[in-house]
Amino acid sequence: MTFVSISAAQLPAPDPPKASAPKQQDQADSQTASKTPDKRVFGILPNYRTVQDTGSVEPISAREKMRIAAKDTFDYPVWVTAAGFAGLYQMQNQNPSFGQGTKGYFRRYGTSLADQMVANMLAEGAFPVLLHEDPRYFRRGTGSKRSRVWYSATRIFVTRMDTGGHGVNLSELLGNSIAVGISNAYYPDTRDLSDNLQKLGIQLGTDAFSNVLKEFWPDIKHKYFEKHHPRP
């Protein structure tokens, strides 16, 4: 009888452990959600400018920049949020010369709508075209929560250029500053320097918060709103 000696090196290597099917499915769903951002965050906030930062995103044309700005400006939620701001300003009696009642409310509604529309078209359309800046928000989607919050909030100061490099976000800063200056034409009660700085701060703070929502919306949606059906 012949005995054959088999060493451990000759034995087939065990297969590496495989991730469970539900976990693989969750990862695939999350990646898909990141690559195809919703048009609106929470069904309200326009999200046409968000793209996933893959490291090799092609620049867009001037026409595409203006198209994105127009979609962000005239999308129906803008009219709804303007109505909300008008109600808040009415309760606070901002710009007392507008008065109260229906007339005062609609004056506040019109000016609130003008604030958003003028700022959007300048900061997301006109200035990005003139300064060759990319108005889109490049979602990171990876890293610690703190680093992502810092990244998204600071995009109001840092932008991607059409050449692929990065620079100061002059479109955001100049666009909103000029929009605030234009607003002096229809806000007779708030035209001094401190009022203008306050309005600019609110605009920039709102845009920074908007970027944070855009950064984390796919994660929030995947965790809390999507229905996961476990495999049998």
Image (tube, rainbow, N blue to C red):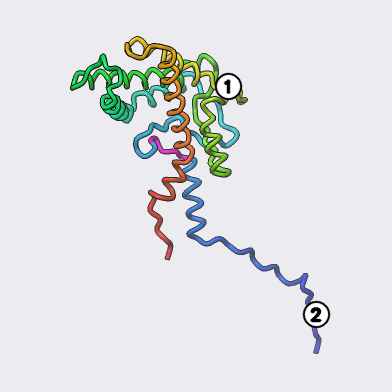
Residue at the location (46% across, 25% down)?
Answer: 204
State the residue position of label 1. Answer: 168
User: Nearest the camera: 7 or 109?
Assistant: 109
Q: Quadrant of the N terminus?
A: bottom right
Residue at the location (18% across, 22% down)?
Answer: 101
Residue at the top extreme of this rendering: 185
Q: Callout 1: few (<14), some (14-19), or many (20+) C-alpha neighbours within 10 Å?
A: some
Give the amino acid type for the residue marked by disc 1 in the picture. Answer: Val
Looking at the image, residue 178 lies above or below residue 87: above
State the residue position of label 2. Answer: 5
Taking the image as shown, residue 78 lies to the left or right of residue 174, namely: left
Q: Is residue 23 magenta?
A: no
Disc tally is: 2
Which residues are the magenta region? 36-40
Image location (x, y in percent) of residue 176: 45, 18
**Quarter of image, res 105:** top left
Mark 2 touches mark 1? (CB < 8 Å): no
Looking at the image, residue 39 lies above or below residue 122: below
Image location (x, y in percent) of residue 226: 39, 50
Q: Earlier in the sequence, mark 2 or mark 1?
A: 2
Taking the image as shown, residue 51 lies to the left or right of residue 92, namely: right
Please, what is the dominant secondary structure of the magenta stretch?
Answer: loop
Residue at the location (48% across, 48% down)?
Answer: 30
Q: Quadrant of the C terminus?
A: bottom left
Could you tell me which secondary element the residue under label 1 belongs to? strand
Image location (x, y in percent) of residue 63: 46, 19
Could you tell me which secondary element the residue under label 2 belongs to? loop
Image location (x, y in percent) of residue 103: 19, 18
